[in-house]
Amino acid sequence: MSQQYRKALAELSKARLSALVVSTSTFGFLAASTSPISYSTLVAASLGTALCSSCASTLNQIVEQDRDAKMKRTAQRPLVTKHVISTPGAVALACTTGLSGGLTLYHGTDVVTTILGVGNIGLYAGLYTYMKPRSEWNTWVGAVVGAVPPVMGYTAATGGYGLFDLEAALLGGTLFLWQFPHFFALSWMHRVDYARGKFQMIATNDSAQGDETARLITRYTYYLSAMPFLTTMSGITSSMFAVEGLALNGYALYVANKFNDDRSNGNARKVFLTSLWYLPCWMALFLLHSKKWKRAIEEDETLDNDGIISYLKLRAGEIRNIGKELCVHEIATVSADIKDGDDSKEGQSGKCPIVFGKAKAQSVADNATIVSNSTRVECETKR
């Protein structure tokens, strides 16, 4: 296979986009997994997701090749130039990757994950592609497509039973929201090109000042900023994820507001580039502060035999301990214990008090029950 042909296949499959999709699917799998992990299922989920993504991208370019020919950023795509591969060849590639992707998911994971993967091909190559030249709502449909892969990873890890878990919904919701500042910034930079292709995008139909684009970027960045708090309040991650999310989302909001003040291509590019490193940082921090991973580290005696996942979880535990040592509250509490002469409390200060949601409420309720029972016993003794 020649280098040109391999490059054409990679462009038809949108290899970089497929790699991003696989990374979010793998993230969903790891978020749901506890030891022991099924590596065969993880490989099948990742490979099947990649093949389905390749199929969807290829079908999209088959349909849009005439419009791609009108745009500078897509004028050199394989089906536009037809130097290396023709439309029948692309159809063969789409059929091969779609069929093999569906079979890989079916035999390697479960029915639910398979339906999500195959359904996403139809959603992207069908409804999304159809809507792009017809309605601005195509962006919202495309965001749904991007939200599905982490849910696929989650269902693959849970045998299909985790589809309606709150954690799966929050992971998918995060990917859904992330795509709006990411894509609105990209479409603003290429608004003239999208107009040449006659695509109905917010940016192409916006005012010259980009009022609607700026408003939506800012709005969805604020929505995205709420996700670390929601996962913490739901008891899925520790409180430190919400704290670290303040810094992560604070910068995202900074560049979003900077674009709002000055709607230049340069500022749009900053929003776009921020979104590229924001997502892997968010996923890494989520896993680092995942309570499932924390329980696995503390309780699972099989970690030593769990290969890569064991290594990741042990390293996560080490990083978490380092973070605890650097926590201002932990340092202040330990110092106060030592100052008061109570060395027995050193290192036992418990949790940082930045605790949210029902976990704290349950703790308060449990304490109230203990006090109530103690009082009742005391009263009966006196009686």
Image (cartoon, grey):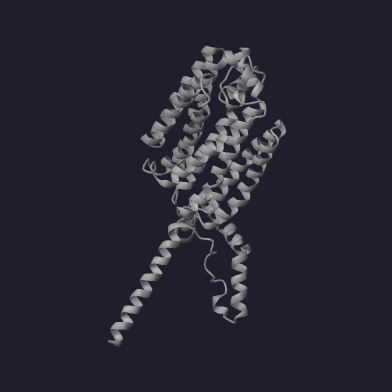
Across and down, in percent, residue 153 comes to 46, 40
213 vs 334: above or below: above
Residue under the point 39% across and 66% down:
365
Image quadrant holding the C terminus, namely bottom left
266 vs 287: above or below: above
Residue 38 makes an appearance in the image: no
Side of 19 where 33 appears, left or right: left
Observer-nearest residue: 155 or 147? Answer: 147
Across and down, in percent, residue 140 comes to 50, 31
Image quadrant holding the N terminus, namely top right
Residue under the point 51% across and 53% down:
310
Across and down, in percent, residue 53 comes to 51, 28
Side of 325 where 44 appears, left or right: left
Across and down, in percent, residue 209 comes to 67, 29
Observer-nearest residue: 97 or 140? Answer: 140
Side of 108 where 181 appears, left or right: right
Residue under the point 64% across and 19% down:
4
The number of discs equals 0
Observer-nearest residue: 94 or 369? Answer: 369
Residue 36 makes an appearance in the image: yes
